[in-house]
Image: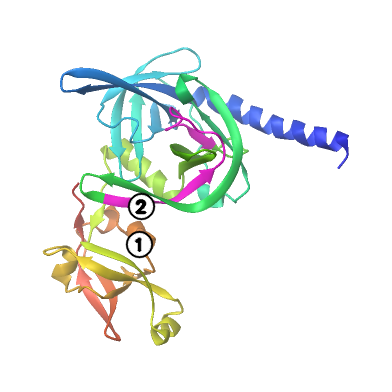
Amino acid sequence: MSAADEAEALDAYSRVVSTVAERLIPSVASLRVGRRTDGWRSGGAGSAVAFTPDGYLVTSAHVVAGSESGTATFVDGSEPEYRVAGRDPLSDLAVIRVDRSVPAAPLGDASRLRVGQLVIAIGNPLGFAGSVTAGVVSALGRSMASRDGRASRLVENVIQTDAALNPGNSGGALADSAGRVVGINTAVAGVGLGLAVPIDETTQRILGALVHDGRVRRAFLGVVGGSRPLPAGLAHELGRSQALEVVQLLDGSPAAAAGVRTGDLILALDGRPIEGVADLQRMLDERIVGRRVALGVARAGRRLELDLTPIELRT
């Protein structure tokens, strides 16, 4: 590649990053979070991204944990007060609301990302508003543990990037080269390693639930399990190699009431194949709460179908 070609490539890269920054910076707010603990008022900081023009912003649940309100500062200098509309610690997502119109950022689809793809992070690290960093998608399909009270969950398909992220970036935007928000920066795992919760079909449903209901309803079965290889004959019959083994079972839970036993291999739930924890988690949403569904299991070489009615998860 000639020097002229290298300069042209650099200019093209710069144009992409600057265009995305110009498009999204007005949609990213710096948050000042007010908390009261044992009579003392304390504060925190983070970022948030406007995703509807009527004042809804998405941020990280841990940014607004223990708080119901604060101040959102936009690049135009406005500082409206916000209130927390809803939060979901099990996905590390929260929605806040300001009483004014805001420039909404377009949401993308993280399922279309590829390793090595250019991404741009916009947020307010260390209090520096409107900061922009760029990098690539370092890895896809990572999992991140989250907890809410006694309940724990793996946040699926977390995006790993080498775009520089620092304290205060949490809740900010991770965008693709078209300026679409594909992730919400949620953690700094180490030097040169940042993580973001993906914007995809699942998280879009979560945001919708937080806007309309202020919470996310999830189904509860009462099993703890892990992936296990299927016996050869059953693998050949089903055309797949794994299922979810029940390693713990909560007494009195919906699974126990349905006749599930420790050691059972869960093959399917409501007609959808289950190969591991991620498959089961995807199924445990409000659509099956209180509804009788079929649970396909393998036990001692036999296939069984059990009737199970999930209840709502209480944290």
**Which image quarter: residue 251?**
bottom left
Q: Estimate the x, y position of residue 224 in percent, counting from the top left.
A: 26, 63
Whichever of callouts 2 and 1 sits on the residue coming sooner in the sequence is 2
Secondary structure under the numbered disc 1 in the rendered image = helix
Residue kind at label 2, given as amino acid type: Leu
Magenta segment includes 205: no
| Residue of label 1 | 277
For the record, the magenta segment spans 152-174
Residue located 47% across and 12% down the image = 77
Label 2 crowd bin: few (<14), some (14–19), many (20+), radius 10 Å: some
| Residue of label 2 | 154
Gap in Å between the C-alphas at discs 2 and 1?
Answer: 9 Å
Magenta segment includes 167: yes
Q: Nearer the viewer, residue 4 or 209?
A: 4
Please say if the residues under marks 2 and 1 sit with CB atoms less than 8 Å apart: yes
**In the rendered image, the vertical position of residue 106 relative to residue 225, given as above or below:** above
**In the rendered image, the vertical position of residue 98 relative to residue 267, given as above or below:** above
Residue kind at label 1, given as amino acid type: Val
Q: Residue furthest left?
A: 252
Q: Residue furthest front?
A: 191
Secondary structure under the numbered disc 2 in the rendered image = strand
In the image, taking residue 271 as reference, residue 194 lies left or right, namely right
**Which image quarter: residue 310?**
bottom left
In the image, taking residue 158 as reference, residue 21 lies left or right, namely right
**Which image quarter: residue 14?**
top right
